[in-house]
Image (tube, rainbow, N blue to C red):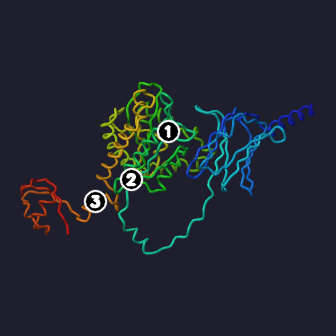
Amino acid sequence: MKNWITFWVVVLLGFSIQGHAANINNVRLWLAPDHTRLVFDLSGPVDHKLFTLSNPQRIVLDIPKSTMKTSLSSLDLKGSPVTRIRSGKRQGKDLRIVLDLNAKTQPRSFELKPNAKYGHRLVVDLVKANKPKAKTVEDTATAKNLNQKRDIVIAIDAGHGGDDPGAIGPGGLREKRVVLAIAKELERLLNKERGFKPVMTRGGDYYVSLRKRTQSARKKEADLFVSIHADAFKDPRAKGASVWSLSQRGASSEMGRWLAGRENNTDLIGGVGTLSLDDKNKVLAEVLLDMSMTASLKDSREIGSYVLKNMGTVARLHKSTVQHARFVVLKSPDVPSILVETGFISNPREAKLLKTRSYQLKIAKAVFKGIKEHFYRKPPAMTYVAWKQKGGDNPVSRYKVVSGDTLSVIAQRNGVSLGRLRKANKLKSDVIRIGQVLQIPTS
């Protein structure tokens, strides 16, 4: 009996050591600013081993008992550190894939389980090697920069990307391409507007994890994070644009719960490996996060209202008020954040509009106007917009007219000429009314 048990233990261990056999049915390559991603579509789970070789630089990927069922020659390697990719059988049964490189990289690999869009996948990321930081030289320019009127930083987040296409509309229209086009139009408009500086979470067709998008905004010290989407719903009759801010108590509607659940699962589609967001003090962290987000949530709702109002001039609205849901991408504790649904790509009529550059520009202009309106009403301190709102090189103060005031008395009291006071307030006569707010030029 013991011999039979020993026999089966050895057999089972043998199967475990040898790993799973699978076919590689397809290979995709995505370029990001900080890494290159290779995705291998598999017929089933596999074991793999990855190691590097130097002189020349190479990465070797061994996958036991597996077979390459696709051509590697069709991969576009332009812009990547990979000069050539080749494969062959090792010892007659194990598959070996070799990546010839033109630069040193820091490789990482992980496997992904099947989801709604893909089957088993093996992901290899080639992360660019860190360059040594240049030593900073302190001089008078540093002190001078502290006094400069800074730009308002807007983080623009085009949803999905790379291996995650997002929602797919009629004719194969992909959300990731539509929203990137709109995001780039918004970036262009903000670049033209003095006092604003746009930064993109992704500028091309590659995937960025949800947490990394918000981290990028915080790293750039953004004053606003705006995530752009064009989602789908199970009913193709669903229509209309909407604006969302974070809800701490759940979604404001069944639609919100459905959309939030879908967006929060995109990391399973794009792939973030074995990254864990858990910590030992989860409850405490949640409480502290909720406390720190109070101010940014208020601003998020206000900005969302301005954007929604302007969206209503160019698009049909799904809801007339800002909606709330627990989108992970909005959970930045100190950056006001909104998510703009530009329409339903699953609706044939809206999909037809969203694929045109003219409509993409209209949507971008509406978002831009909403952002500008908010920040000119409530500019952050030490910004160009705040300085301009105070009169720029000709600063002004404000005075509210009370009973007994006359324009000449107000002018005399503030040490300005009557003519200058009229000009500052565009008055055609000296008639003023109680409660009227006057701009008082200051010297």
Q: Amino acid at mark 2?
A: Asn
Q: Who comes first in sequence, dot 1 or dot 3? A: 1
Question: What residue is pinned by disc 2?
Answer: 191
Indicate left or right for 289 with 310 as reference.
right
Quarter of the image with the N terminus is top right
Find residue 176 and name its label.
Answer: 1
Q: Position of residue 109 (x, y in %)?
A: 67, 46
Cα distance, mark 2 to mark 3? 18 Å
The reply to whether discs 1 and 3 touch (Cβ–Cβ < 8 Å) is: no
Residue at mark 3: 388
Instruction: Give coordinates of residue 287: x percent, y percent.
Output: 48, 49
Is disc 3 placed on a helix, strand or loop? Answer: helix
Which residue: 73% across, 38% down?
46
Kindly indicate whether the residue at mark 2 contacts the one at mark 1 (C-beta within 8 angstroms).
no
Kind of residue at disc 1: Lys
Q: Which residue is at the front of the view, 5 or 94?
A: 94
Quadrant housing the C terminus:
bottom left
